[in-house]
Amino acid sequence: MQQADYIKEIAKYGLENDQEKLLFTLNELIEHSKQSRKVNFALQLQSILKDAIRQQETKGILRHGSSKHSIREEDREVADFILEKLTSDYRLSHLVCSSEVRENLDYFVQEHRSLDILQKYELPISNKVLFYGPSGCGKTLAAYVLAGELEKMMIVINLGAIVSSKLGETSKNLAKIFRRAATEDCIIFMDEFDTLGKVRDYSQDHGEMKRVVNTILQLFDYLPQSSIVIAATNQQDMIDDALLRRFDLSVQLDLPTEAQIKELIDKTLKDSSFTFDNPNKAKRIMKDSIGLSYYSIQKTLLTAIKRSLLAQKPPFVKAQQRIQTEIWANLIAQERHHLL
């Protein structure tokens, strides 16, 4: 059967309210999607199906304090802690980084692709990763790359919603999100991790922060090996030492070198019709970009492309479009000025 045939059957059984056949066909479509390399689509369907079954199990009038009532209430609360659930098409080839970073990420991916072998010899699986470094240097992209390479659903956590002013609530909120992740065999991604794992501040509530740090340590210890936690921070020095030691892999993502800037530009322009009107000047601009983040450099390049295109007279149908290096140079100069 083709995907279209499965979709027609799902529509038919849905309209007929035949839940048994609907679920059977949905599961068949998920397997078909996996076999035809539409893994992200399969993961998204699986997640929708799990959520729907979970909601159905707690549907109707429930006695307050019952286990089903507690599950329903926790589901509502957990939903507030999740920014989004997503799959990723990014691969290691999309990431511009040092050879050391690439090698570490590649080994991490290999570990999770070889879970059965490692577990056979009772070897621990690395499943806790910390990305640290300046803003705009690829920490979030690196998380997307791991999700794409491992073909796992990634839950992006809203730390602002998790952190509570009520005594003890932050620890409880963390436990709820980790419980959910453990059942879904997914990746938990926490940006600005220093919000949770910051060094204990003795001038404030030392006891509360200690509880949060201890909770995270315990949750890390009991995380299933097939689930993964990825944390990202611009302020590694603000994270408690005990937490830092718990990460199996700590990866520093730095500002790009001149060679990495060139690689970034090449990747950005690959398979496009855009070239520089003055290649020699473009090389000089790349040198001038040293000290800026990947994000800032790529942002200025894309802005230069748009402005160069709009500066032309319509119609915009040239086989090859020229990027005005003068525009790009001015944008890079503005970015550098913002750093001062």
Image (cartoon, rainbow, N blue to C red):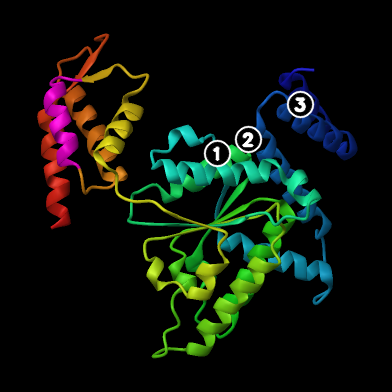
Residue 282 is one of the magenta-drawn residues: yes
Check residue 335 in the rendering and tell me which mark sits there, or answer none.
none
Circle nearer the N terminus (3, 2): 3
Q: Write the start and end of the magenta stretch as one range.
A: 276-289
Do callouts 1 and 2 mark residues in contact (Cβ within 8 Å)?
yes
How far apart are labels 1 and 2 at the CA level? Answer: 7 Å
Residue 69: % across, % down: 79, 69
Q: Secondary structure at mark 3?
A: helix
Residue 51 is one of the magenta-drawn residues: no
Please give the name of the residue rendered at 48% of the width and 88% of the height, measured from the top-left corner: 206
Seen from the viewer's position, the closer of residues 222 and 314 is 222
Q: Secondary structure at mark 1?
A: loop
Q: Residues within 10 Å of mark 3 (few under 14, many from 20)?
A: some
Residue 285: % across, % down: 15, 35
Instruction: Indicate left or right for 241 with 46 as reference.
Output: left
Check residue 88 in the rendering and tell me which mark sits there, or answer none.
1
Q: Is residue 245 above or below residue 93?
A: below
Please indicate, yes or no, whether residue 137 appears anywhere in the rendered image.
yes
- The residue where tag 2 is placed is 40
